[in-house]
Image (cartoon, helix red, strand yellow):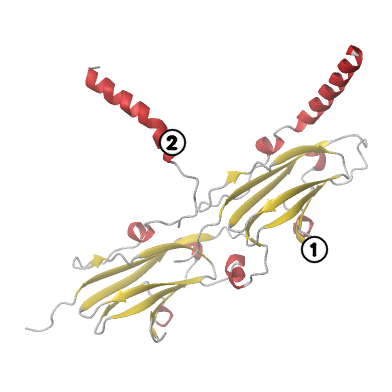
């Protein structure tokens, strides 16, 4: 019994160690490209980092609220050389696809309608690396209340 | 260090957390607060006084917005505006009769002047309208309620309207 318990503990420890390779990757590597002096952003707790194999995808469920501004910054380690696909989808359609914009890593928008969206991040295929190789990807999400425009 | 200084330091130390809690994360209030007071140049005429109807606000390219002010018979007014450079040149200021919607003054017919002085002979309400030339996704999305999100323009800037007035000086002997 003790042996089984120890084995489980070892497996969990090994898994958590490998997961921690990308721990807080978004905090240390994702740097917003533009700074808007009129909007004061706060980091959302939906910001995340994870390891992804070439060709794999990760879907993050996210709720955007009307009356809020969002700033999303994508970053990845050298394995993906900055070419990571990023899509925002709602139930019906693709709202944003960064492959239309040369794999842009920075998006700032104002939300007009509260809705649930899926943030889909896909790593590019790499034939030159081992299939088990993983690279870190981070998504920094910042949010702020939309500033009032006009008098 | 005497007792009085020690007490004062202790009181300040105890008050420190209160300042921390006093901070707010609510950034929904209008930005550009006091811009018209700090950035617009006042008249050289010392008799002009700034009115409380002076305003400032955040603008993007392609946006227009108006503010309603009351002007009174027997007074001279100087209405001027100033803006952040990011909004570009050729900003339009109109003064519109609030009742009839007639345009009383349009600076695009006056070489885009940034100030206008006039004497009032009838008390009434007018709109001072500011229009920023150009276009932006945010301004275009104003009338489209179907959009879920709009790409942000970082080209935002402040516009201030400075309204100054004085009693119309008597003419002649």
Question: Which image quarter: residue B110?
Answer: bottom left
Q: Secondary structure at mark 1?
A: loop
* Image quadrant where one finds the N terminus of chain B: top left
Instruction: Work out whether disc 2 and disc 1 sit on a shared chain.
Output: no
Residue A98: x and y, percent?
76, 55
- Point out which mark residue A92 bears: 1
Looking at the image, residue B100 sits to the left or right of residue A12; the answer is: left
Q: Residue furthest top?
A: A2
Using residue A17 as the reference point, say whether residue B166 is left or right of it: left
In the rendered structure, find residue B20 and report the number of the disc placed on it: 2
Chain label for disc 2: B
> Do callouts 2 and 1 mark residues in contact (Cβ within 8 Å)?
no
Under tag 2, what secondary structure? helix
Q: Residue at x 23, y 80 (%)?
A: B73
Whether residue B134 is visible: yes
Distance of label 2 from label 1 (alpha carbons): 45 Å
Furthest toward the front, the residue is A1
In the image, B51 versus A125, the foreground residue is: B51
Q: Position of residue A92 (x, y in %)?
A: 79, 63
């Amino acid at each position: 019994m003790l042996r089984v318990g120890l084995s489980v503990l070892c497996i969990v420890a090994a898994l958590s160690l490998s997961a921690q390779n990308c721990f807080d990757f978004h905090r240390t590597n994702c740097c917003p490209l533009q700074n808007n002096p009129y909007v004061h952003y706060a980091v959302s707790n939906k910001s995340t980092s994870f390891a992804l194999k070439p060709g794999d995808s990760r879907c993050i469920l996210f709720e955007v609220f009307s009356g809020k501004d969002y700033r999303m910054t994508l970053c990845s380690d050298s394995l993906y050389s900055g070419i990571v696909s990023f899509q925002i989808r709602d139930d019906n359609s693709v709202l944003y696809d960064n492959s239309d914009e040369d794999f842009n890593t920075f998006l700032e928008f104002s939300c007009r309608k509260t809705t649930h969206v899926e943030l889909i991040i896909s790593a590019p295929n790499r034939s030159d690396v081992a299939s088990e190789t993983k690279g870190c990807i981070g998504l920094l999400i910042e949010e702020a209340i939309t500033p009032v425009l006009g008098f | 260090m005497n007792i009085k200084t020690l007490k004062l330091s202790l009181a300040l130390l105890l008050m420190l957390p209160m300042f921390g809690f006093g901070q707010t994360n609510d950034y929904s209030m209008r930005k550009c607060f006091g811009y018209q007071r700090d950035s617009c140049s006042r008249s050289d005429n010392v008799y002009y006084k700034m009115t409380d109807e002076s305003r400032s606000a955040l603008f993007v390219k392609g946006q227009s917005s108006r503010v309603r002010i009351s002007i009174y018979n027997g007074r001279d007014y100087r209405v001027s505006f100033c803006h952040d450079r990011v909004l570009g040149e050729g900003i339009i200021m109109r003064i519109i009769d609030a009742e009839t919607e007639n345009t009383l003054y349009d600076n695009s017919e006056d070489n885009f002047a940034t100030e206008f002085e006039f004497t009032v002979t009838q008390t009434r309400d007018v709109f001072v309208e500011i229009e920023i030339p150009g276009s932006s996704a945010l301004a275009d999305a104003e009338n489209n309620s179907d959009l879920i999100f709009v790409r942000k323009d970082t080209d935002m800037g402040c516009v201030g309207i400075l309204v100054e007035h004085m009693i119309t000086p008597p003419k002649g002997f």
